[in-house]
Amino acid sequence: MIVRKEVIQLPAEASVRSASRLMAEQGIGAILVMRGEKFQGIFTERDALKRVLAEGRNADATTLAEGMMREMVTLDPDAFAVDALRLMSQVGIRHLPVVDHEKVTGMISLRDFIGAEFQLAGKNSEVPRTQFGACGKGTRRRVRRL
């Protein structure tokens, strides 16, 4: 599976503005939120938009703990790529921390899969048929009420 080993993280007390700046500088869409050495959750660019900016909250005064997604969805390191895609599709997320015994060992994003598909397509004359269809016909993004 494609997993980014270097995962950017900030403390839960960090501001949404500092996280947004770091994500912009690093060209990433998600940051792990930590409290000491313990993984607390994930803060994404969508969280910044929906939970902070759209609600008129101050990005300098709002902490990551206040703005992050409350439900933690993670993936076991032994899972297959199709499992990650299926889970992301079912829950409606774009970033998935890989956790082994309560320790984050990496992060996978939908963007990682897109890059892999383009690399494979470059080696073949047509875009390959992959297991991405294993998510099932009619799979739709679920709308979650927060």
Image (tube, helix red, strand yellow):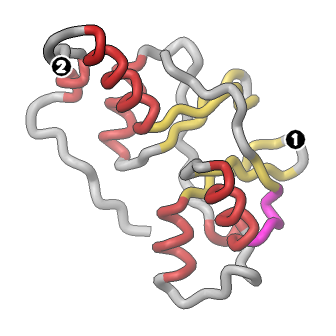
> Callout 2: few (<14), some (14-19), or many (20+) C-alpha neighbours within 10 Å?
few
Residue shown at 62% from the left, 69% from the top: 67
Measured along the vertical axis of the image, is residue 120 above or below residue 108? above
Q: Foreground: 87 or 31? A: 31
Left or right position of 80 against 90: right
Q: Is residue 139 magenta?
A: no
Looking at marks 2 and 1 on the same chain, the residue that comes earlier in the sequence is marked by 1
Q: Residue at x 75, y 43 (%)?
A: 39
Image coordinates of residue 116 in percent, x first then y, are: 39, 22
In the image, is 12 to the left or to the right of 83?
Answer: right
**Numbered label attached to residue 19:** none
Mark 2 residue element: loop
| Residue 11 or residue 5, whichever sits in front | 5
Amino acid carrying label 1: it is: Glu
Discs 2/1, front: 2
According to the picture, the residue beneath numbered tag 2 turns out to be: 127
CA gap, disc 2 and disc 1: 42 Å
Q: Is residue 85 above or below residue 54?
A: above
- Name the kind of residue labelled 2 in the image: Val
Tell me which corner region of the image, top left, top right, bottom left or bottom right, holds residue 11.
bottom right
Q: Quadrant of the C terminus?
A: bottom left
Q: Position of residue 42 (x, y in %)?
A: 62, 51
Q: Disc 1 designates what residue?
A: 37
Displayed quadrant of residue 132 = top left
- Which residue is found at the position 82% from the left and 66% from the top? 13
Mark 1 lies on a secondary structure that is: loop
Density class for disc 1 (Cα within 10 Å; few <14, some 14-19, many ≥20) is few
Q: Which residues are magenta?
A: 11-15
Q: Magenta span: helix, strand or loop, mainly?
A: loop
